[in-house]
Image: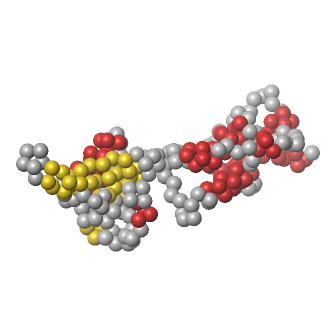
């Protein structure tokens, strides 16, 4: 009985420190002298049951305990059913979505379902079979892959009939594969910058990171680890509030989307 009262006091203190004092999970664990995982478990159970702080006056320790730790019953395997792994995989590409959040949603719909560790284990087990190599995942709006296509396009002047070869700039968003293409007669710096500006207009926004190849218009000094960005290209990135991280030399998977 003494252990039970001690446990309920700590549950109440965890909720108070979280919702009244705004402390982090690590700080709460140190204050209450319990494991960080225990803090996360208490807060998760309270969140699922809609409890915060202060607790309703009508809820005594026994009522709170029954809410957070209901009696264990025999659960049929059907109630453990995971959501579609493909659904989880696609949701993780969205900005701000994590496995922790998806598990919370799953647990709300399936209170007797898998715990967080098993939920993550089953997903990672499935994801590990998608490809024998490391599989890249991207958040929405995170990365834009840019490069020039290897082949040129013949463009005929309708007046003179002269045919010139045009360079094809391609920009692809990491999460959605949404692609923009722009043809110009050169790969020089003005054409390179204009292609980016046109791509931003087309997408209606600017990504957090741009991943270019090591071509001279964007990178003045190619290097496997620390390439030097062209000053004008860098000014463009600063103007639009984005970052440029060139692909590593000889690593086509760094920009596989646009490859």
Residue 246 on image: x %, y %: 36, 63
| Residue 237: % across, % down | 30, 53
Is 91 in front, or is 165? Answer: 165
| Residue 19 position in % (x across, y down) | 65, 39
Please report the residue visible at 69 percent of the width from the left and 54 percent of the height from the top. 122
Instruction: Tell me the quarter of the image containing the N terminus.
Output: top right
Residue that extends furthest to the right in the rendered view of this protein: 1
Residue at the farthest front position: 161
Looking at the picture, tell me which residue is in the foreground, 50 or 14.
50
The residue at 65%/55% (across/down) is: 126
Is residue 132 rendered to the left or right of residue 219?
A: right
| Quadrant in the picture for residue 61 | top right
Residue 258 sits in quarter: bottom left
- Quarter where residue 26 is shown: bottom right
Q: In this view, does 55 lie above or below 135?
A: above
Q: Which of 97 and 187 is in front in this view?
A: 187
* Total marks placed: 0
Residue 87 sits above or below residue 35 on the image: above
Identify which residue is drawn at 33% across, 47% down: 180
Residue 212 visible, this angle: yes
The answer to whether residue 13 of the structure is visible from this angle is no
Image position, residue 152 (x, y; %): 24, 58
Name the quarter where the C terminus is drawn: bottom left
- Residue 7 is left or right of residue 236, and the answer is right
Question: Is residue 20 shown left or right of residue 230?
Answer: right
Figure coloring: secondary structure
The residue depicted at 25 percent of the width and 65 percent of the height is 216
Residue with the most extreme left position:
160
């Amino acid at each position: 009985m003494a252990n039970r009262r001690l446990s309920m006091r700590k549950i109440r203190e965890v909720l108070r420190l979280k919702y009244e004092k705004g402390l982090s999970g690590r700080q709460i664990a140190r204050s209450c002298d319990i494991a960080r995982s225990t803090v996360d478990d208490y807060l998760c159970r309270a969140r699922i049951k809609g409890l915060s702080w202060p607790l309703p006056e009508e809820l005594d320790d026994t009522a709170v305990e029954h809410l957070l730790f209901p009696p264990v019953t025999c659960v049929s395997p059907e109630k453990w059913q995971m959501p579609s792994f493909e659904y989880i995989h696609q949701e993780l590409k969205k900005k701000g979505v994590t496995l922790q959040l998806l598990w919370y949603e799953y647990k709300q719909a399936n209170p007797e379902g898998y715990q967080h560790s098993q939920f993550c284990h089953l997903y990672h087990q499935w994801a590990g079979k998608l490809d024998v190599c490391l599989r890249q995942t991207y958040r929405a709006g995170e990365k834009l892959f840019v490069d020039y296509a290897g082949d040129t396009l013949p463009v005929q002047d309708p007046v003179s009939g002269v045919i010139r070869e045009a360079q094809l700039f391609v920009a692809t968003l990491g999460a959605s594969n949404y692609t923009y293409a722009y043809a110009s007669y050169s790969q020089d710096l003005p054409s390179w910058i204009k292609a980016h500006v046109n791509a931003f207009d087309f997408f209606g926004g600017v990504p957090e990171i741009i991943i270019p190849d090591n071509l001279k218009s964007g990178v003045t000094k190619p290097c496997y680890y620390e390439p030097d960005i062209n000053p004008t290209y860098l000014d463009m990135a600063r103007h639009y509030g984005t970052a440029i991280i060139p692909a590593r030399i000889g690593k086509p998977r760094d920009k596989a989307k646009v490859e």
